[in-house]
Image (tube, coloured by chain):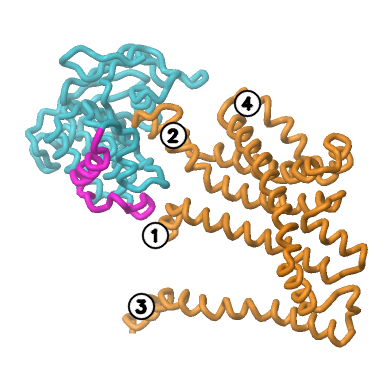
Chain colours: A cyan, B orange
Amino acid sequence: MATRPASDLTVRVTGLRRTFGDTVVLDGADLTVGRGEVVALLGGSGSGKSTLLRALAGLDPDATGSIEVPDHYGVVFQEHRLLPWKRVAGNVALGLTGGDVRARAVEALTEVGLGDRGDAWPAELSGGQAQRVAVARALVREPELLLLDEPFGALDALTRLRMQQLLERLRQRHGFAALLVTHDVDEALLLADRALILEGGRIAEEIPVVLPRPRHQDDPGFGGLRRHLLDRLGVPAG
Amino acid sequence: MTTTALKQVAASPARAPARRRGPRRWYRLVSPLALFAAWEVTSRTGLLPEEKVPAPSLVAQTGWRLATDGELTTHLLDSLTRALIGLGIGGSLAVVLAATAALLRLGDNAIDPPVQMARMLPHLGLVPLLIIWVGIGEELKISLVALGAFFPLYFNTYAGIRDIDQRLVEAAKTCGLNQWQRLRHVVLPGALPSLFLGLRLAIGAGWLSLVVGEQVNAQTGIGFLMMEAREFAQTDVVVFGLLVYALLGLLSDTLIRIAERRTLAWRRGLQAT
């Protein structure tokens, strides 16, 4: 189903359709992600953001249309989805092949600041730590593309800010492209090069986020973009 | 004042388990010991006739005699062999069929309905039919144990596989695990807690079936020992046989629980938080 896209693109999706019974959730959505580009996918609740991401992750055999994604991609879900019966390093190393599996897993854990927790059980971690392990599990595969489904949505506000900074650092170091499904407008503006609004089963609007990095909520230009996106998502200024 | 109140609250949960654990075990020994003592006294004084219920000390003496002259070992080994073979056959059949039914739609449609129907038959009531089918030899005892062990293990394995969180399977898929690897890393460990529970229940049912099976034309085994003793009104041997059955059940259950605790160490991690 998934084939490799042209050289300057990491993802190319054309005419993606998905229905649940009579409900059309995705109605011919088109989108591309460039090499090393971070694209945020915004949309109201039930707009099909997660459905789109699941189709890209190869988890939805009933989605039709053309999907081109790279061979090496990682997925981070809203819940950490670590196997409770494997220690942290074992979870990160899951499905890895080749030599030095353990060393590579520990290295990825070190990158997310958990190099010393490899022997812990997932149940012994806090929510933020478990989510960092999930990021390490995606990173260790040296992905060209990260698919992120509201990855920090279940974390408390402070942890979420730290995770966003961590993701930004990792992106600068590894240069992966990312598709970030989120309902958090600030998160989209902090991390993304481009924001897409999913509405009526299609990409209804594309907004380039031209802000210098590292970004901050207090930057000039941030407020205007936030206002525009919130308007677009149906939350007009009170 | 607020500080003292807080300190008390903080101190009590830390101290409570330590205080409870030690003496509580002690207390739990008191009533069984009292029962044994009462049994001994009533038997000795003749309040309980010896031919109905012999005193515990007499049962212990008989047990010691049977154990030292080698008679017990022979019968015990034969009973154990029957239990192990029956459990092996019934148990492996249960796991294979349950896995097929839980993982494949075709398997579910083909296997589960007849198993659900058969489960309502009391398998110990099948003895007359089994005698016609397999005779009154070893096959009967082994079939009964296998039948007894099959159902609990089948249902628990089936439920264990079906209860696995689909989201974990998806996550494993995105890590590039193929179907066999997902079976090994996600399905099997995920179903293991239920499998252990099924095994414990299966062993219990297996022993029960063996008790019944060994009363039909056995030439050896603990059940035979008891049946033979009944004919000669050796109540002490009958009671001792019962105790051996009970001990075998207890011992096998403890072994499984130890294996369970070792294999499912990740659950201890769960409790530790």
The residue that mark 1 highlights is B273
The residue that mark 3 highlights is B6
Q: Circle 1 sits in a helix, a strand or a loop, which is it?
A: loop
Q: Earlier in the sequence, mark 2 or mark 3?
A: 3
The Cα–Cα distance between marks 3 and 1, rounded to whole angstroms, is 22 Å
Q: Give x and y (percent) for residue B45.
A: 86, 87
> In front: mark 4 or mark 2?
4
Marks 2,3: beta carbons within 8 A:
no
Q: Chain of mark 1?
A: B
> In front: mark 4 or mark 3?
4
Residue shown at the point (16%, 38%) measured from the top left: A170
The residue that mark 2 highlights is B169
Dot 4 surroundings within 10 Å: few (below 14), some, or many (20 or more)?
Answer: some
Q: Give x and y (percent) for residue B102.
A: 59, 32
Q: Is residue A22 magenta?
A: no
Work out whether A8 lies above or below A178: above
The Cα–Cα distance between marks 1 and 4, rounded to whole angstroms, is 39 Å
The Cα–Cα distance between marks 4 and 3, rounded to whole angstroms, is 59 Å
Q: Earlier in the sequence, mark 1 or mark 2?
A: 2
Q: Earlier in the sequence, mark 3 or mark 1?
A: 3
Q: Chain of mark 2?
A: B
Magenta stretch bounds? A99-126
Q: Is residue B105 visible?
A: yes
Q: Circle 2 sits in a helix, a strand or a loop, which is it?
A: helix
The residue that mark 4 highlights is B107
Residue kind at label 1, given as amino acid type: Thr
Residue B128 lies left or right of residue B56; in this view the side is right
Q: Is residue A231 visible?
A: no
> In front: mark 2 or mark 3?
2
Q: Chain of mark 3?
A: B
Residue kind at label 3, given as amino acid type: Leu
Q: Quadrant of the C terminus of chain A?
A: top left
